[in-house]
């Protein structure tokens, strides 16, 4: 197997699109460090969008707070039970 084939196989084995995006971002950063010019405005735009969404979520959290008797641990236990079942 050639080095390129191995790289393609590694990319194909990544579990989701977020992992592929992370991998591509790492390659772009490596190329910039290695002296190759790469347009990173796409990453900056993505960061800006994510920041806006995060700030919007923070505003919603202030507008609609959780009730005082909300049990985070109980919700987490139920979600883990639904996803993984009983683990003994």
Image (spheres, rainbow, N blue to C red):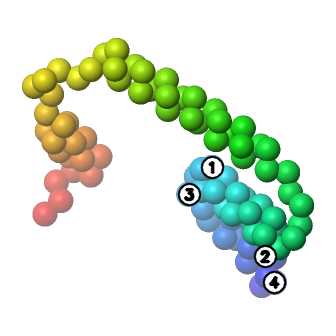
Distance between the alpha carbons at the discs numbered 2 and 4: 5 Å
Where does label 1 land, which residue? 17
Out of 58 and 14, give the one closest to the viewer.
58
Nearer the camera: disc 4 or disc 1: 1
Which disc is residue 5 wearing?
2
> Crowdedness of circle 2 by 10 Å Cα count: few (<14), some, many (20+)?
few
Distance between the alpha carbons at the discs numbered 4 and 3: 22 Å
Dot 3: element = loop
> In the displayed structure, would residue 5 be above or below residue 59?
below
Dot 2: element = helix
Image side of residue 61 versus residue 19, left or right: left
Q: Earlier in the sequence, mark 2 or mark 3?
A: 2
Where does label 4 land, which residue? 2
Nearer the camera: disc 1 or disc 2: 1
Out of 4 and 33, give the one closest to the viewer.
33
Place residue 62 in its image quadrant.
top left
x and y, in percent, of residue 29 in the image:
74, 63
Can residue 30 be seen in the rendering of this structure? yes
> Crowdedness of circle 1 by 10 Å Cα count: few (<14), some, many (20+)?
few
> In the displayed structure, would residue 80 be above or below residue 54?
below
> Crowdedness of circle 3 by 10 Å Cα count: few (<14), some, many (20+)?
few
Residue for point 42% across, 21% down: 59
Residue for point 63% across, 57% down: 22
> Crowdedness of circle 4 by 10 Å Cα count: few (<14), some, many (20+)?
few
Discs 1, 3 touching: Cβ within 8 Å? no
Which disc is residue 15 wearing?
3
Discs 2, 4 touching: Cβ within 8 Å? yes
């Amino acid at each position: 197997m050639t080095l390129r084939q191995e790289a393609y196989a590694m990319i194909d084995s990544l579990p989701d699109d977020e992992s592929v995006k992370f991998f591509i971002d790492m390659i772009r950063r490596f190329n910039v460090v290695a002296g190759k010019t790469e347009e990173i405005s796409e990453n900056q735009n993505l960061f800006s969008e994510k920041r806006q969404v995060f700030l919007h979520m923070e505003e919603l959290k202030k507008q609609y707070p959780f009730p005082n008797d909300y049990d985070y641990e109980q919700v987490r236990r139920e979600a883990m039970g639904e996803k993984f079942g009983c683990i003994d």
